[in-house]
């Protein structure tokens, strides 16, 4: 009897330890996944930032908008995602509430700055394709920097306002998930003005660009060679940035859709679903450097010179990349 009791006790202890082992395994895997994603996002966007800042040939209005977007993506990988990993693996940390608020404010700031930067990129492409004769007068470096300042100012104000809003009573998540449930009115207003209107604006602009580009494609054969080359370059840039915009909208729309209808559905959407969609949105910050490298030969050349350390051996800022 005594040995039998010991055996039963050992079996009970082993079964009791299974959830702990599973939780630890999940935590380790999540740390590896989140850490790897954070490194990829940080490294990729750092390459974009250094390339545009260092090589004078890349000092164009469009590239400065891409630089601003890369800064937002870099901060997602450098600040938001590491905080999220820490919050996930340390549920009962004494500074959890403070860290959760800081992460939430940074999250809103980066997401809003990204959407408004993408909106500005759409405006830039509209003038480049639809009104090419007015492009250089309407979109110059001074105008672009004003647009960037407006984007970051609006995003900062939005982040401060939303972070000061208290979550609705009875729906606070003790583990500080990837979302903080606000009141129904606050959530809907934030989703509509922070994502919905810019997304509709961006889609409308690119629809117009698509129609104009289709007409231009028919007239390219009637152009001289230099005019045709310029038109093809603008169309290629527009196509590439359309992919950037499309990937951004596809990555963030599921989360915005769920968080908007979450209060309307009486909070029936599982938190794990919301977290998964939020991580999908954050993962978008990793895509843009790969898109630039795939479509732009000058970015590939710039990345190669940075990775190999060539720019540290001499002054290559005036190098011809294309």
Image (spheres, helix red, strand yellow):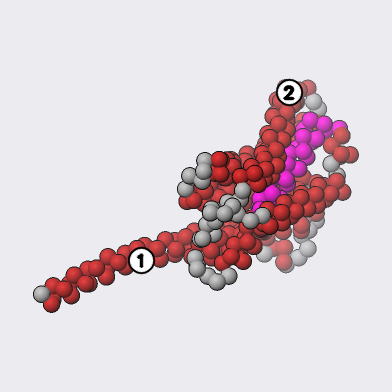
145 sits to left or right of 204: right
C-alpha span from label 2 to label 1: 62 Å
Q: Position of residue 143 (x, y in %)?
A: 85, 46
> Which portion, as a residue range, is magenta?
108-133
Residue 181 is situated, as x and y percent measured from the top left of the image, at 58, 51
Choose top left, top right, bottom left or bottom right for residue 127.
top right
Quadrant position of the N terminus in the picture: bottom left
Give SS at disc 1.
helix
| Residue at the image point whose x is 52% and y is 48% from the top | 274
Residue 215 badge:
2
Residue lying at 73% horizontally and 41% vertically, measured from the top left: 119
Mark 2 nearby-residue class (10 Å; few <14, some 14–19, many ≥20)? few
Residue at the extreme bottom of the image, as rendered: 2
Seen in the picture, residue 1 relative to 35 is either above or below; the reply is below
Q: Earlier in the sequence, mark 2 or mark 1?
A: 1
Farthest-out residue, right = 137
Residue at image coords 87%, 34%: 134
- The picture quadrant where one finds residue 213 is top right
| Picture residue at 84% right of the left edge, 49% below the top | 146
Q: Is residue 258 magenta?
A: no
Image location (x, y in percent) of residue 40: 58, 57
Q: Nearer the viewer, residue 181 or 80?
A: 181
Asked whether residue 130 is drawn in magenta, I would say: yes
**Vertically, is 29 above or below 192?**
below
Residue 223 image point, x, y percent: 80, 25
| Residue marked by disc 1 | 21
């Amino acid at each position: 009897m005594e040995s039998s009791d010991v055996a039963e006790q050992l079996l009970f202890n082993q079964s009791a330890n299974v959830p702990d082992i599973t939780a630890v395994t999940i935590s380790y895997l999540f740390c590896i996944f989140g850490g790897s994603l954070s490194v990829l996002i940080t490294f990729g966007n750092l390459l974009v930032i250094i390339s545009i800042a260092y090589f004078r040939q890349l000092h164009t209005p469009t590239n400065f908008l891409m630089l601003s977007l890369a800064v937002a993506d870099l901060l997602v990988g450098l600040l938001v995602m590491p905080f999220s990993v820490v919050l996930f693996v340390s549920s009962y940390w004494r500074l959890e509430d403070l860290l959760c608020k800081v992460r939430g404010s940074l999250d809103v700031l980066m997401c809003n700055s990204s959407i408004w930067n993408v909106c500005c990129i759409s405006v830039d492409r509209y003038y480049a394709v639809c009104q090419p004769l007015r492009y250089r007068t309407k979109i110059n470096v001074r105008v672009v920097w004003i647009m960037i300042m407006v984007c970051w100012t609006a995003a900062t104000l939005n982040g401060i306002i939303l972070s000061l809003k208290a979550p609705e009573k009875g729906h606070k998540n003790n583990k500080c998930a990837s979302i903080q449930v606000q009141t129904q009115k606050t959530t809907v207003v934030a989703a509509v003005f922070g994502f919905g209107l810019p997304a509709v604006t961006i889609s409308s602009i690119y629809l117009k660009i698509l129609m104009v580009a289709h007409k231009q494609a028919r007239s390219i054969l009637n152009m001289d060679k230099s005019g045709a080359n310029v038109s093809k370059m603008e169309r290629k840039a527009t196509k590439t940035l359309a992919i950037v915009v499309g990937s951004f909208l596809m990555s963030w729309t599921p989360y915005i859709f769920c968080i908007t209808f979450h209060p309307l559905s009486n909070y029936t959407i599982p938190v794990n679903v919301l977290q998964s969609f939020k991580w999908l949105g954050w993962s978008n910050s990793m895509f843009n450097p790969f898109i630039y490298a795939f479509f732009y030969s000058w970015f590939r050349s710039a990345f190669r010179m940075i990775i190999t350390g060539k720019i540290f051996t001499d002054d290559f800022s005036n190098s011809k990349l294309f």
